[in-house]
Image (tube, rainbow, N blue to C red):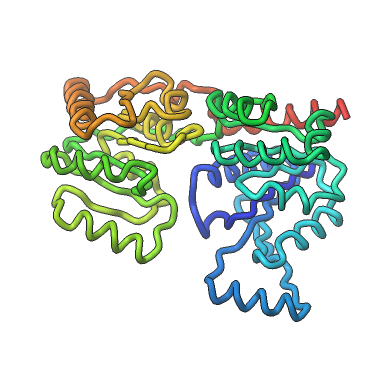
Amino acid sequence: MKILVAIAEPYLPETHGGGLLDIHELCREWAKDGHEVTVFAGRSESRIRRRIRRILRLMGWRQHPFLGVLDGYFVLRSGSHAYVDNLSDWVDAEKPDVVVLQGSRFAMLLDALSGHDGLVALRLVTRESAAEIAGLSWGSRDFRERIRSGETMVISNSQFLARETKALTGIDSTVIYPPITVDDTGAVPSRTESTILMVNPIAIKGIDITLEVAKIRPQYQFLLLESWHLDDRQRADLNERIRSLPNVRFERHSDEITRVYDRSSVLFVPSQWQEAFGRVVPEAGARGVPSVYSDRGGLPEAAAGSGVMVDPWAPPQVWADALDGIIAEWLKHSRLATVSSGRPDIVPRVVATEHIELFESARERH
């Protein structure tokens, strides 16, 4: 099967995020099974470069996408000024069997696929993406017809997101959990320090709560790990905020996330955002790291009954007490029970196969 995954945003390794890791895991598994897989992504561009390209486009110049290979599948990267034209040309020339769209700007992506008569799958990984297709659902008769006929399908990455999608759009979506490589190989290290890991230290992920808890629990060490790229100004602002907190440190994004988990005793997820899933929770759980997390969005699904759940609007003292309790339990048993390694519904091979079976079934019907 020839599969195209199209996203308007930049892709690995230019930027990072859970949704991009989903794509990488899926494409890698599909390629292993002999499918011809291509990711068509945007490119990271400075403001000056974007301005220059807009001027060149007005002059009739168009830059073609850059081609690369990542873990057995192709990656094409196009500047925003020519993205739609380049994507449309590629689809017309290569005629993929299935086009998977993810991220945002679905209207733009679908416009580029106007000549495509194959299957289109919208893979939703945020509540915002569900809200975006709500606009398409109510505003485009052609889109509604494609959904009705089965030419376009919707996949949600959690039961929570499927419910939100149904409420916002009236569309039933198929739930397939994110593919997560659970690294539970080797012995889980013995941890002697109480290090609290917080991934993605930004406002909507709960950095304010994290720093308040760090103030009232100076006996714990807090590690803030970059996930979404922070520019120089954002990093400077964060470093200024933690300057007076000797028990808090910041580290840049790491591709060796297992090593980070192995240095941590608890994963702290005080997210204020309606998380669609929350892949860090099962990732950490596989290394014996329990989570203290918000009762927000799909996080309870990601935790699957493990760890400690807290009201997202609870004051810092409540979060601190939750940390105290889970660390006391951890010190008592060395390793808290986690469920990640026993979850077949997030194993990349299983998840990739679920997608292929769904695609094949839809193609047979149409």
Asked if residue 330 can be seen in this view, the reply is yes
| Residue at screen point 79% across, 34% down | 144
Closer to the camera in the image, 128 or 61: 128
> Quick check: 79 above or below 175?
below
Looking at the image, residue 87 sits to the left or right of residue 282; the answer is right
Which residue is outermost to the front?
A: 139
Closer to the camera in the image, 53 or 182: 53
Picture quarter with the C terminus: top right
Picture quarter with the N terminus: top right
On the image, which quarter does residue 117 sit in? top right
On the image, which quarter does residue 30 sit in? top right
Query: How far across and how far down the image is residue 179, in percent?
Result: 55, 34
| Residue at screen point 78% across, 38% down | 143
Instruction: Tell how many labels.
Output: 0
| Residue at screen point 62% across, 43% down | 28
Asked if residue 353 can be seen in this view, the reply is no
Query: How far across and how far down the image is residue 178, in percent?
Result: 55, 33
| Residue at screen point 27% across, 29% down | 314
Query: How far across and how far down the image is residue 325, in percent?
Result: 19, 23
Which residue is outermost to the left?
A: 219
Looking at the image, residue 48 sits to the left or right of residue 148; the answer is left
On the image, which quarter does residue 112 sit in? bottom right
> Quick check: 176 above or below 235?
above
> Quick check: 24 above or below 362?
below
Closer to the camera in the image, 68 or 144: 144
Looking at the image, residue 299 sits to the left or right of residue 344; the answer is left
Closer to the camera in the image, 80 or 358: 80
